[in-house]
Image (cartoon, coloured by chain):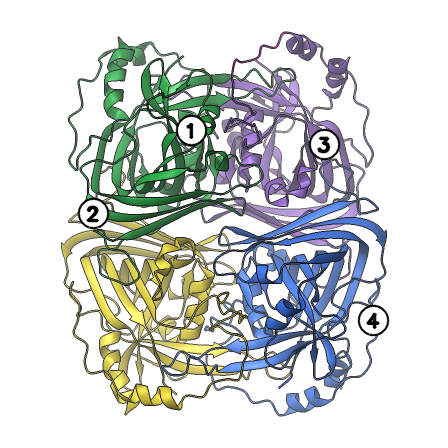
Chain colours: A blue, B purple, C yellow, D green
Amino acid sequence: MHNKEVGRRNVLAGGLAAMATTAVAAPAFADETAVAATTAATVDEKLKGYTYPLSARGEANLAAAPPWHYAGDVVGVEFWTSAAAAAASLPTGLDPDPASSGHGYALFIDWQFSGDNEEYLDPVRSQYGEFLVLLDAVWQGTPVAWCPFIYVDNDSALARGWVQGFPKKMGAIRQTRAFAVNSQAAPVVGAGGKFAASMSAAGHRLAEATVTLEKTSATLPALGRPIVNLRHFPRLSLGQYDNPAVHELTMSILDNPQVANTWIGSGGLTFLPAPGEELAALAPERTGAGFRGSLSYTVTDLRILN
Amino acid sequence: MHNKEVGRRNVLAGGLAAMATTAVAAPAFADETAVAATTAATVDEKLKGYTYPLSARGEANLAAAPPWHYAGDVVGVEFWTSAAAAAASLPTGLDPDPASSGHGYALFIDWQFSGDNEEYLDPVRSQYGEFLVLLDAVWQGTPVAWCPFIYVDNDSALARGWVQGFPKKMGAIRQTRAFAVNSQAAPVVGAGGKFAASMSAAGHRLAEATVTLEKTSATLPALGRPIVNLRHFPRLSLGQYDNPAVHELTMSILDNPQVANTWIGSGGLTFLPAPGEELAALAPERTGAGFRGSLSYTVTDLRILN
Amino acid sequence: MHNKEVGRRNVLAGGLAAMATTAVAAPAFADETAVAATTAATVDEKLKGYTYPLSARGEANLAAAPPWHYAGDVVGVEFWTSAAAAAASLPTGLDPDPASSGHGYALFIDWQFSGDNEEYLDPVRSQYGEFLVLLDAVWQGTPVAWCPFIYVDNDSALARGWVQGFPKKMGAIRQTRAFAVNSQAAPVVGAGGKFAASMSAAGHRLAEATVTLEKTSATLPALGRPIVNLRHFPRLSLGQYDNPAVHELTMSILDNPQVANTWIGSGGLTFLPAPGEELAALAPERTGAGFRGSLSYTVTDLRILN
Amino acid sequence: MHNKEVGRRNVLAGGLAAMATTAVAAPAFADETAVAATTAATVDEKLKGYTYPLSARGEANLAAAPPWHYAGDVVGVEFWTSAAAAAASLPTGLDPDPASSGHGYALFIDWQFSGDNEEYLDPVRSQYGEFLVLLDAVWQGTPVAWCPFIYVDNDSALARGWVQGFPKKMGAIRQTRAFAVNSQAAPVVGAGGKFAASMSAAGHRLAEATVTLEKTSATLPALGRPIVNLRHFPRLSLGQYDNPAVHELTMSILDNPQVANTWIGSGGLTFLPAPGEELAALAPERTGAGFRGSLSYTVTDLRILN
């Protein structure tokens, strides 16, 4: 029963495009997850925990097992990179979307995380900034969003991300904030309000965005497609470097997605080159909508595609 | 005329206690500033800027001259430390307040700064966390708030603070955030909503607070007294270590103070000892109100008391 | 066969205890590894790279495939925790060492990393601080060192560590440094020289050590046993949280280990409690040798134990 | 009299160019300093300490009064910027050096600080990275070195710097390190050894250098002139923004300067533009010597020039 409910969320699978400020009823998707759950094996291990480090009490791990609840403010810009650059960024198993070649989004998100035990009351561990790129792609005929690059400033967020297949690196991410009080130090959340955001890693500025709000929107112009990641964990044994222990396409499942206070308008976006980085290979040729709003969802599951 | 207007703000001087969500008309305070302004000298200097570093174009300085606009979210807790500890923290020129011995506030603030040119669009430089303690004191019969310790995570904020007399050190400050969207990852801004905050410096946790909201409040239960600082800049020449170049009590002047979305309730507060720190000498013996809200003001002036 | 050979290299490998200041002649290197290489499977993947993120050019990954060369300065303290605490920290497959129950080392290391292309010329990415604990244990009758907790301040180091099975979290690690020049600001590398080290994570101080040098040593009193880790990568699919995709004991293989400038003496060590941490469960009951020196090795392989 | 003596020490002081690897006999130390000390005024202040924050016990201040002992490793590059850019960076009171117009040095230093009480045993507070530029200039006919820009990653270092007149901002500074052990992860301190260094601030890379060693040197090809700074502390009172409370040229006095293990060779240097920075206005037109070595000195005094 429970699993069936979970299954029902699936099509939603990251589909925030149609989300208004109230929860969305999602159509049925798949029954496989229920089957998987009943047949699950359990490893024989004295130590407790979900991610590194496993430990005697199971309290030291960077990330405990789900549920993982998220609330955040997003500043984002729609953009088009070259079709060739977008295609080159896709893993085996994904194809360019012929209908929207090179189209994608750059998102800067100020997140707050929690499990079921008010973990948001430890803001040092629960808060983080995130920058990610989503590019239109197709998986076996289904329009999806591929995440080639993503940065966070928190190791617990990095650990949860890796488990989901998000290829997170550490970076410094900031976005302009709005406040409940009027001030010349903050933009209005309204027509003409300006927000900016930036991301740096290893001391190099890699991305900068500006957004000017024009009008409210019932939806968030991104996350309209399920996010597909490449879950990957390499082997280190000699001769096995190219034979990873884990290498599988995944589809994110987002429970109870909600958005609020969403505004759209125009946006500017720049990606800057740096050694050891390939984000600038996806440099925008033009931008579309800029937007700013709040979103929330819960993660309890992941669909493995291959 | 202009100076007279400034003078009018003065009594306000940090008096947010009576501030509702709209701007407050402040009574007249003093005429001295006008006199001072008219007689101001100007240093003969080719380089431009306000704080370090002065430079050819005047763009490299950590802080440009005012106006300095601020908007922030505050999580705070009222507390009482021992009368002896509070008295020991006061500089020459301030006396304990016999009516509220040991009474004070601990404030954690997520700030956004701007000058007059949309500097909030550079969030890396304009945003910062701040933790400060304010203790009741009396200056020449006037009830004031003395700031013995304050920490920020941004060097521009540190530079502006030093000029005001705020004795800022660098620290890591975080507070629970609220979002426009419902989520198990965030508290409600409403009855029962829980917020936490912490401050660490040099890898030591120094302060932790929790607040549970109960009801709205038209005012912010802190900043009800003008803040008095000890502006100080030492000499390094041999024999002059105890003869600072600048050493004067100051009173902060806050223009156009506003608060919004203010809630009060109960609070918990802990100060922790560490080498090279004296915050724990002010450890709370009991706490009073906890509160959370937004505030804004502008700084353009400083009153020198002695 | 392969394992036997690897094991031989490995005994050396983890065996820095017997390493003097010159290079060590390594025993015969197995030919079986070549065999392994030729028979290794290769995943079908267009994207290039070794760890996250795989990318079009293969330059964005946090860690490229080995060789991984390391040079570092270590400040370390030998200690004994309670036998019960040490036993509780062991994973399934490892047993307490009856000959040295509760015995271990705390190591603080300032590392510099490089691949084969002078990556040490990018110090932002190649340098990092590390803190780790090693505890005596036994694997199938073989004395080994188990690493329950390890912290670094660099995401590339975290990525390489996870692949090896090191359960790395992010922390802030610092150790006193020595300089080629005499100064009251630095200890002598000689009798009476004092070094200190500390580690903090999430704003909490977790470990502090002091070492006073007494005499030179041809060996480094730690790393005398091969390090055994628990390589682990969880599943996120519903019902699979306790069925990790990767969960295997590993034995580290260190090529060409060298030490230099090694001094030993006495040491002090403290582990401090914090929420979300279990290091303090291994609090020292007493300490043994303190030491300080330099070490280097290369990693190209990992032995999987089960 | 006093100044004359100080000046004598000072010529030595800033004069590391002639320093060999052993201590330097310092010229007679003026007795007048004792006189100065006895006649020095002392502020009437209950609180204790030297810099912010003054406090009841005097332990919380960012920087205690001297002596300030320093030991460091420096990676540096000699360069020439345009004569016009160098001249534009000079404060009133300094003139371009007609003999070496545009000539200067970029220095990256890994410092360790201590007072007289083994403060180097708190490496979190005592260690820091520093980047600075020194440009040839003339003060009243005396060749001096002017420091237009300097960055550190430690607030105690920033506080000490401001008192000396160094216009420090916060940045992230790293340099390649050498180790006592051979490794492909580290350069040799010898002919052909390569070192690199970088500085970033506010997430922007601002400076990058590379040095290739060729031969030993008895001296350090920088710090050959006394450093002149502009000590500056502004006023905030309305109408006084351009009338700083402290604004004076100073000459650094370095006691007991020593260098060791100094190598010179060739160097490369790049300054990169960013908003809010003017370092790139001093971009190198060509470079001269690259060098790497260790240095130490003590600071107890500062000469005020005007």
- Locate residue B149, reporting x and y percent: 53, 34
- Locate residue A134, reporting x and y percent: 67, 66
Q: Of the residues shown, which amino acid type is indicated by label 4? A: Val
Pointers 3 and 2 within a single chain: no
Label at residue A102: none
Left/right of residue B298 with respect to residue D14 in the rendered view: right
- Locate residue C266, reporting x and y percent: 21, 55
Tag 1 residue: D166
Few, some or many residues within 10 Å of mark 4 (<14, 14–19, 20+) = some
Pointers 1 and 3 within a single chain: no
Q: Which residues are magenta?
A: B39-45
Instruction: For marks 2 and 1, give the CA distance.
Output: 32 Å
Q: Which of pointers 1 and 3 indicates the residue nearer the eye? A: 1
Q: Is residue B44 magenta?
A: yes
Tag 2 residue: C193
Tag 4 residue: A24
Q: Of the residues shown, which amino acid type is indicated by label 1? A: Phe
Instruction: For marks 4 and 2, give the CA distance.
Output: 66 Å
User: Which quadrant of the figure has residue D117?
Assistant: top left
Left/right of residue A197 with respect to residue D153 in the rendered view: right
* Circle 1 chain: D
Residue occupying image coordinates x 33% and y 69%: C134
Few, some or many residues within 10 Å of mark 3 (<14, 14–19, 20+) = many
Residue occupying image coordinates x 54% and y 70%: C55
For the residues bearing labels 2 and 1, Cβ distance under 8 angstroms: no
Residue C277 versus residue D114: which sits nearer the camera?
D114
Few, some or many residues within 10 Å of mark 2 (<14, 14–19, 20+) = some
For the residues bearing labels 3 and 4, Cβ distance under 8 angstroms: no
Q: Of the residues shown, which amino acid type is indicated by label 2? A: Gly
User: Which quadrant of the figure has residue C24?
Assistant: bottom left
